[in-house]
Amino acid sequence: MPHKIGFVVVSSSGHEDGFSARELMIHAPTVSGWRSPRFCQFPQEIVLQMVERCRIRKLQLLAHQYMISSKIEFYISESLPEYFAPYQAERFRRLGYVSLCDNEKTGCKARELKSVYVDAVGQFLKLIFHQNHVNKYNIYNQVALVAINIIGDPADFSDESNTASREKLIDHYLGHNSEDPALEGTYARKSDYISPLDDLAFDMYQDPEVAQIIRKLDERKREAVQKERYDYAKKLKQAIADLQKVGERLGRYEVEKRCAVEKEDYDLAKEKKQQMEQYRAEVYEQLELHSLLDAELHSAVDPLLPATDPHPKINAESLPYDERPLPAIRKHYGEAVVEPEMSNADISDARRGGMLGEPEPLTEKALREASSAIDVLGETLVAGAYCKTWSYREDALLALSKKLMEMPVGTPKEDLKNTLRASVFLVRRAIKDIVTSVFQASLKLLKMIITQYIPKHKLSKLETAHCVERTIPVLLTRTGDSSARLRVTAANFIQEMALFKEVTSLQIIPSYLVQPLKANSSVHLAMSQMGLLARLLKDLGTGSSGFTIDNVMKFSVSALEHRVYEVRETAVRIILDMYRQHQASILEYLPPDDSNTRRNILYKTIFEGFAKIDGRPTDAEMRARRKAATEEAEKQKKEEIKALQGQLAALKEIQAEVQEKESDAVKPKNQDIQGGKAAPAEALGIPDEHYLDNLCIFCGERSESFTEEGLDLHYWKHCLMLTRCDHCKQVVEISSLTEHLLTECDEKDGFGKCYRCSEAVFKEELPRHIKHKDCNPAKPEKLANRCPLCHENFSPGDEAWKAHLMGPAGCTMNLRKTHILQKAPALQPGKSSAVVASGPSGSKAGSKIPTPKGGLSKSSSRTHAKR
């Protein structure tokens, strides 16, 4: 069943002083939440880490009344170890966004509670806040978030819906009707049911003490239903409904009291406090009379009931309607409702007598235990700190803080030390308090003592050490608390305290964090200790901080054997962080890096992490590279074979067409020969029908090696009239290379034509090329040919191409000239059409012969078809 998921704030882009993002981890009527810095840059972002990997079902946001973001985006990420990849946005997956109302209709007086239903698995949640809505109150263009609530269930149990489906199927065959109207509104059969007590509105508008009682009563109600004690369940249901109204009223009083304190209206604050105490006492007494306040609840909400009178007289008519006692209590008291109203003086007298306004007297045990503190601070203040009512305990800490702040500078050192030690005694006790507000008040008091009281009065480091030594063990214990909120608060304060300049030099906290984990310690305690160690190592390092290579590595290596996966994972991360700083010094604490050690997945992860830090490829990367190289080689081989096959086919087709055309042209001429004149083929002793055999039609070379395969190789590598395009690897005629680059090449979009030299130039270089005018201007095509290799102009005509590209005094940039070519006997131009066909461009019309991928181009076949 989905429930509230605890979280910790990992990072934020910034905050206004006093409104840190860590405030979002607390849900109570008086919280202020997070605010962005004034005049900040947008977007702003906050990253949260859930206490466990979970499937998020619902997100709830309580927006500020006027510091409102126009849009909030949500991103989620799995809990990936930081040593595998740096902390970066690419690891987050976008879920979507919500738009917030500009609040103009309410005059920026109400706060919007936004609920978003999602279905996503992860452990990190990122919120991105966009530009604020503009209004007259938000003069610094800030955005704020009062509270956020995450509801979900553990990711390991995300298949609950499948389980529910199986249960429905079983019910069907057993004849049970799971859609029975009698079950409507219950959650016994709903795997996606979300309790109202997990709703954000419950915590944000309920008094914390009453909220605790309601949750316990709700648990009892469920137990009663399971045991079929329906009368008792009904009674509990009604009590819960009534208590929710009570809690909201008390929460409102608390807010009003805090507002009065901020305005320094202490009379109103006192009035609100007394009003809360009286109302709370009446409600708790009713619970007791209805047998709903037993020993378990009594320990958390000790009665403010008048100890001297078990049945006080209540004037219900003097209270607001929704604050009046329940009907049952009025009936029980009988004539109590007609008692005359008590005067203000009577109420004050009663409070002075200890009935409502003062904490109960200290017990004999408490007197003995706190005797030294009583001697210094007085019994009244200590009694408040020991009181069973949480509000008295909180007020006692606030009063003690005020007392310490007001102590004059000239106070004798001995008195200052005694006061400090008495205060630390009460702080240590308050740190163990189960009520969040009391616990937080103890942390604020401890911070004030260390950072203000001791420096102000110039007390020695021994006093600071006393504060830390007495409180750090208790604080570490609270990091293993069952409440995620208290765990996070305690861990954050320990980290903050360790960074106090007064505490850092003492090196006390690091010595506690490297103590070996106990086998019987709780999971939460072990995880918190590991997390604190990892964070403080980054903040303090291993210099003069109390952390050393030896104590950190011994602790981390021993933690690799812990039964909890998260503890082992954090230990791996710490070892990798240590290796980044100290390299080879770390290796002596680890077993040798061999195949036996790498059978342990943790050590394999560690050694592969070392390789990544050193810039060396890991085993997995090496295997992947070898596999990729093999696959790439095979792919290239196949592509080359395919290209050659295509080229061979094209060349064969061209050669067949040329032979057919030439044979048709030679036959009529042989028939018309008169006067003893012989055709060139006859002069060479070659039959007419075989004249083109073993002949390159581009350069005119003839060779016995020019079989079909030999000609293919000649065209591909040796023919001086051809070249391979560097960009698409096609074989093209040099005379048509420029046209190929501009019109047919796979990379033709990247080329442009220079109007001066008429050659193809990369578009990105063309402006510079034209501006510098370094190129050799081209002449008109009728006056000269233009070589794309050496960029020279030479005489026009097809034969001139052959002389330029093949002759010793021609092109100096034709790399194929270095090959030793076996020249065929040159034929005089104009003697036969066959001779013309063997020219470099093969057409009197001067058409170019570009080459398509895999062979000579389609234009080649068209040119030869004309012959």
Image: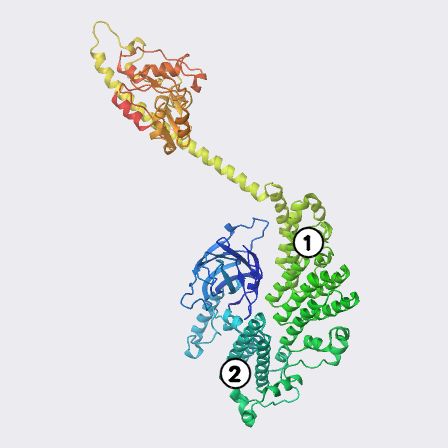
Q: Please say if 612 is above or below 527.
A: above
Q: Front-most of 494 and 832?
A: 494
Q: CA distance from mark 1 to mark 2?
A: 57 Å
Residue 58 position within the rendered picture, expressed as x and y whole percent measured from the top left: 48, 65
The type of residue carrying mark 2 is Glu
Q: Residues within 10 Å of mark 2 (few under 14, many from 20)?
A: some
Quick one: which residue is furthest to the bottom in this view?
A: 335
SS of the residue under disc 2: helix
Q: Image height check: is 555 above or below 607? A: below
Q: Is residue 780 left or right of residue 366?
A: left
Camera-side residue of 540 and 696 = 540
Foreground mark, 1 or 2, reads 2
Is 599 situated above or below 257? above
Location of residue 281 by image quarter:
bottom right
- Most extreme residue toward the top is 675
Query: Can you give x and y, in whole percent of width and height, for residue 503 in the image?
Result: 71, 58
- Quadrant of residue 654 in the image? top left
The local crowd at label 1, few if under 14, some if 14 to 19, many if 20 or more residues have their Cα within 10 Å, is: many
Q: Position of residue 181 (x, y in %)?
A: 41, 78
Query: Mark 1 belongs to which amino acid?
Result: Ser
Would residue 408 be found to the left or right of residue 677 on screen?
right
Where does the image place residue 636, in percent across and percent down from the top left?
Answer: 45, 34
Residue carrying label 1: 556
Image quadrant containing the C terminus: top left
Q: In this view of the protein, can residue 730 be seen by the observer?
A: no
Q: Give the mark, 1 or 2, whose residue is nearer the N terminus.
A: 2
Judged left or right of residue 37, residue 174 is left
SS type, badge 1: helix
The residue wearing badge 2 is 323
Q: How is the image coloured?
A: rainbow
Vertical comparison of 297 with 428: above or below: below
